[in-house]
Amino acid sequence: MKEWQKKHILGIKDLNKEELETVFTLANSFKEISERDVKKVPALRGKTIINLFFENSTRTRTSFELAAKRLSADVVNFSSSNSSLTKGETIIDTIKTLEAYHPNIMIVRLNASACLQSFINYTQASIINAGDGRNEHPTQALLDMFTVKEAKGSLENLNVLIVGDIGNSRVARSNIFGFQRYASKITVCGPPTFIPYEFNEMGVSVSYNLDDVIGQADVIIMLRIQSERQDDLFLPSLREYTDKFSLTPERLKKVKKDCLIMHPGPVNWDVEISSAIKNKIHPLILKQAENGLAVRMAVLYLIGTKKREI
Ligand code: CP
């Protein structure tokens, strides 16, 4: 395997297929560690990792924290709500202040899109994007792809259908960049007001009718409606949305037998997916969360031990 060269992970857009495969191979071996009695290895002993979350999170924050601890790093969890940001300190001054403690890695979640690149000017630490606004959520796409590869054995030439609040979704953008590395055919589906024109230029198909496309998919990624990212919901009503785009028991009958139905979480049951089929759908969503830990261990290992042979 080749040496890992990247200092930062800001987006899947920046990773080639070989780098994606390196993460998946390593994540596979880290899954085994999570099944041991003692779930810890000394790979990042002496390294300092700051979990810097300016926006709420359950899955990403806890799995990065656990991943860092299982690799024996020292971890600090920063959340904006109980920080000096509430007293008027700026985000850049916060980064500069944390840099004074010489961290090795900063894992950053932010509600602004595509401005993490500028953080590099204020810290020597590696930056890992834990979701930045509408831009990218690279480790979510890595864990989604890892979960698909684990279930199907390959990521090549799949029909991937992404449904819902496409325009607001960093998960959609990162998964599109990732699955395109494997020549997969991607369709985004939702109301026209949820699919900005930029998606027509990303090499994906666009559909406004879920019933037309649901039967061809090998993988379906259902997305959450992100009410926090829109002043007014671009929809006449939530009822109309669920009628046309919710995964219901009736629609589930139309999907291929071996189709994987995923959701990055958190799920709004009875909006994106009917709670009547929760017992069928939730186990794979929880598997995604479980795989997120192994994938984030792999990412921290590669970034934290850069230039080490694996
Ligand atoms: N999927 C995801 O990013 O979830 P959290 O917001 O809980 O981290």
Image (cartoon, rainbow, N blue to C red):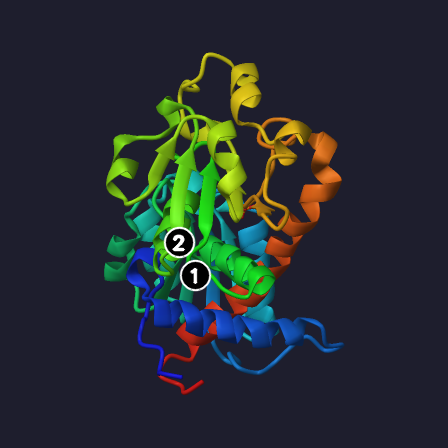
Residue denoted by label 2: 184
Q: In which quadrant of the rendered image does the C terminus lie? A: bottom left
At x 24% / y 54%, what residue is drawn?
Answer: 118
Q: In which quadrant of the rendered image does the N terminus lie? A: bottom left
Q: Position of residue 257 (x, y in %)?
A: 64, 47
Q: Is residue 251 visible?
A: yes
Q: Is 9 displayed left or right of 209 in the figure?
A: left
In the rendered image, the vertical position of residue 288 relative to residue 27, given as above or below: above
Q: Which kind of residue does numbered mark 1 sit on?
A: Glu
Q: Point out which mark residue 106 bears.
A: none
Distance from label 2 to label 1 (Cα)? Answer: 6 Å
Q: Point out which mark residue 156 bears.
A: 1
Label located before the other in sequence (2 or 1): 1
In the rendered image, the vertical position of residue 148 relative to residue 41, given as above or below: above
Mark 1 is surrounded, within 10 Å at the Cα level, by few (under 14), some (14 to 19) or many (20 or more) other residues, namely some
The kind of secondary structure element at disc 1 is loop
Mark 2 is surrounded, within 10 Å at the Cα level, by few (under 14), some (14 to 19) or many (20 or more) other residues, namely some
Q: Is residue 102 visible?
A: no
At x 30% / y 69%, what residue is drawn?
Answer: 124
At x 39% / y 27%, what residue is drawn?
Answer: 194
Q: Position of residue 121 (x, y in %)?
A: 23, 60
Q: Is 242 displayed left or right of 11 in the figure?
A: right
Q: Position of residue 60 (x, y in %)?
A: 53, 53
The kind of secondary structure element at disc 2 is loop
In the rendered image, the vertical position of residue 197 relative to residue 111, given as above or below: above
In the rendered image, the vertical position of residue 131 relative to residue 152, given as above or below: above
Q: Which kind of residue does numbered mark 2 sit on?
A: Ser
Q: Is 217 displayed left or right of 278 in the figure?
A: left
In contact (CB < 8 Å): disc 2 and disc 1: yes
At x 52% / y 48%, what residue is drawn?
Answer: 219
